[in-house]
Amino acid sequence: ILHDLGLGPEPTIATPPQLKPVVLSRSGRLSPKRSATSTFGLLGPGRRVRATVEVAGAATAGVRARLELSCDGRRISTRTVARGMRVVSIDRPNLGPAEDCAVTLTNTGGAARSFALSVRLSVSL
């Protein structure tokens, strides 16, 4: 306002800060038929959810685990971790708004498995 009145210098325009993604991480060991869940909400439209899981025992035969993304009681995406797979990801842009979202890892095999689960929440550009 001072510049408009001729009483001060022209204001500088700063670039807005970059939005940083939120990362939720879990790791541990899952017994057979057990699940690990990370819950979150999406506060607006245009959100991107990227869930990545690393499961031990890539040489084991059959399906070892299932990764599932759901929001507000609706299944969005599912991936299975089968023989030869060590890392599996789900990447879904343009989600939200949603109050109750979850990424669930379920051990579908017959032995306990170590895992590392990472859920990255960002704004789709």
Image (cartoon, helix red, strand yellow):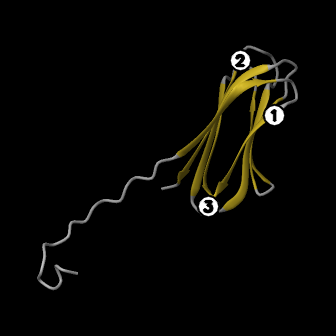
Crowd band around label 3 with a 10 angstrom C-alpha radius: few (<14), some (14–19), many (20+): few
Q: Residue at x 73, y 16 (%)?
A: 57
Q: Position of residue 70 (x, y in %)?
A: 75, 50
Q: Amino acid at mark 1?
A: Ser
Q: Quadrant of residue 82?
A: top right
What element does badge 2 sit on?
loop
What element does badge 1 sit on?
strand
Query: Which residue bears the numbered disc 2?
Result: 58
Crowd band around label 1 with a 10 angstrom C-alpha radius: few (<14), some (14–19), many (20+): some
Q: Amino acid at mark 2?
A: Ala
Residue 64, placed above or below residue 74: above
Q: Amino acid at mark 3?
A: Leu
Query: Which residue bears the numbered disc 3?
Result: 43
Residue lying at the far bottom of the rendered structure: 5
Q: Nearer the viewer, residue 28 or 91?
A: 28
Residue 19, placed above or below residue 57: below
Q: Seen in the image, is 19 located left or right of residue 121? A: left
On residue 35, the disc is 1
Residue 67, placed above or below residue 5: above
Q: Position of residue 11 (x, y in %)?
A: 20, 70
Q: Residue at x 13, y 76 (%)?
A: 8
Q: Position of residue 22 (x, y in %)?
A: 55, 46
